[in-house]
Image (cartoon, grey):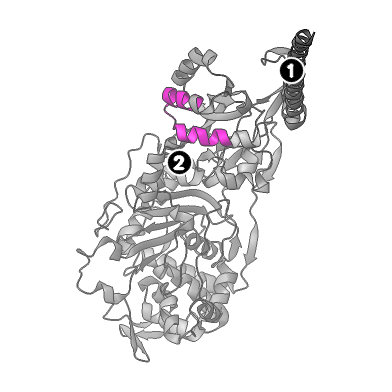
Amino acid sequence: MSEAYEKNYASGQEHSFWLVVVKLTVVAVFSVLTLRLWFLQIAQGDEHLARALSNQFGRTEIPTSRGLIMDRYGRPLVENDVVFDINVVPKNVRDPLALSAEISKLTGYSAEDLNKKFDGFLASRPFSSNTWISGLSRADLAVIESRRHMFDGLSVGVNTVRRPLRGDFAPHLLGYLGEISANQLENPDFDGYRQGELVGQSGLEQSLEEHLHGKKGQRTMTVDSKGRLLQELSVDYPKPGHDVRLTIDSRMQRVAQALLGEKAGAIVVMDPRNFEILALASSPMYDLTDFVGGVSSERWRSLMEDPFFPMQNRAVNGQYPPGSTFKMAIALAALAEGVITPETEVHCGGAIRLGNHTFRCWNRGGHGSVNLHNSLKLSCDVYYYEVGRRLGVDRLAVKLREFFGLGRPLGLELTTEKGGLVPDTSWKMRRFGRAWNQGETLPVSIGQGYLLATPLQVAQYTAVVANGGTLYRPHLVKEIVDFEGRLIRDGSPEVINKLDVSPEYLKVIQKGLEAVVNEPGGTGRRGHLPDVRVAGKTGTSQTVSLERYQGFTAANRPYKLRDHAWYTSYAPAENPEVVVTVLLEHSGGGGANAAPVASKVLAAYFDKSIDTNLMPPYQVQPDSPGGWKGEL
């Protein structure tokens, strides 16, 4: 009995052991299931809810078209081409690194850049379709489409890309598109934009982005879990961007660009009756076609490292001493302040002495007794040294800001517009912590010293003198209309100031500017036209102090030590309708080099029969060496 008991006891023990094992297994299984349910429903509940909803409702964006940019006659300067995009839904991609590597092999895009963009999509829009690659070529599209069954989470969309009609036409003015940056996405001005979109990054494409961009549409539908369309529910149709008609005359723009050629500089052509900009040329240029679909990193690096700064719009953000072109502005300020009259005479013996310093005239032999008329015609420096000494820098600064809008941007439709610099005593104290001395006023009086202006600003004060004393806001936009033709913005001229000066003062300055071009001894004789009476003013601005010129002749002076050549003009002198301002960097005298260029611009303006589409580029041969391809 004892033996039987022991057997039964052992059997019971074994049974109890396996029962415990079974119970523990059941508990473990249910624990795992419970944990899994908690993980799926609680920890990942929002994600799976979003997936479930995405399995029921699908939303796709309908691309819009960017507004056109046209010249003043309605001729398009850019166009919108149909292109293809690769879109990706991040949460539908099983292996992002492998997908990026494969797409990189097929398209040539950097796998590192693709990964970076993907991570951004994953963080901000994981369940939405995001534009991963824009502007896909048809060849790349065919390759992707033939392998799309291998790629989870990808789709191909139709879009438009901005393409200039000519890549070398006004690139600084029109500007280019680039992918929206992280900083821009955080800017309230870009509310509604998303990563991967192309936006204006320079020129008018940037400054008029809110008008040109348009609004994308959206299609809502029911889809199955694999994204296949079941039913279309609603469509919010896209709204194209607004069309912009500029004040630019594309014919005159081509003339200005051709005349600059390979010279570093700028040409501004303006209507003095309303300050409409007819041409705004800057050189050296870059090619807008390099930016279609995104510029390569190699090309961008070469542009940024170019010592001649081809990306700079010299017409509106190049700031230079305006040289003797400035003498018309200081003359009007001095007349208005009563420190001179048209008959005031100053003796020029070739220099003027102030304290221990000698300030020389460009004509070392002197001009003798000079009145206002001859001071402009002969561009006598000593006359304006004396005018500046009498006027003082503070009174001069006030008049320059009031009369001509100098020292600040006037609101041209380009975000890169600079305001130049009008110095005064308070500015110097703020900038250097030192008091102004009278010897610093004299260089300012001839457009040198601390004074800086852009070519646009030189055109501004020329236009104010030409039109009899009205300062308008310079503008590039003639009108903006929506896709239904309704006027959104009218580019009517805006008056900033009407000069409170005697008309006789303006007339004496106008006559002096006519003498510059048309009378014997005038410094701008090379700006003369046979059939149109031109008024103008030459200018030559130093780039360094006179001491650094020592040891060099005009012929062997290093490029960066050469003077800037200026010439500003208007015509017809008796009834002005066009202002032409020319700046040629490091090119020597304005009368010899810039005046002939302006003369050719004016000749083309008045000879409307010239077809610049067929016209060969002008070949400008300056009398003194220079050019942006020169030695640095």
Characterize the local packing of mark 1: few (<14), some (14-19) or many (20 or more) Cα atoms within 10 angstroms.
few
Q: Is residue 221 visible?
A: no
Quadrant of res 610: top left
Q: Which residues are magenta?
A: 99-119
What secondary structure do most residues of the magenta stretch adopt?
Answer: helix
Residue farthest along the bottom direction in this orientation: 355
Q: Residue at x 35, y 73 (%)?
A: 378
Q: Position of residue 126 (x, y in %)?
A: 65, 31
Q: Which residue is mark 2?
A: 251
Q: The residue tagged with tag 1: helix, strand or loop?
A: helix
Magenta stretch: includes residue 101: yes
* Residue 10: x %, y % from top left: 74, 13
426 displayed left or right of 227 = left
Q: Residue at x 33, y 71 (%)?
A: 544
Mark with earlier residue (1, 2): 1
- Mark 2 residue type: Arg
Left/right of residue 266 with respect to residue 397 in the rendered view:
left
Question: Which residue has dot 1 on it?
Answer: 17
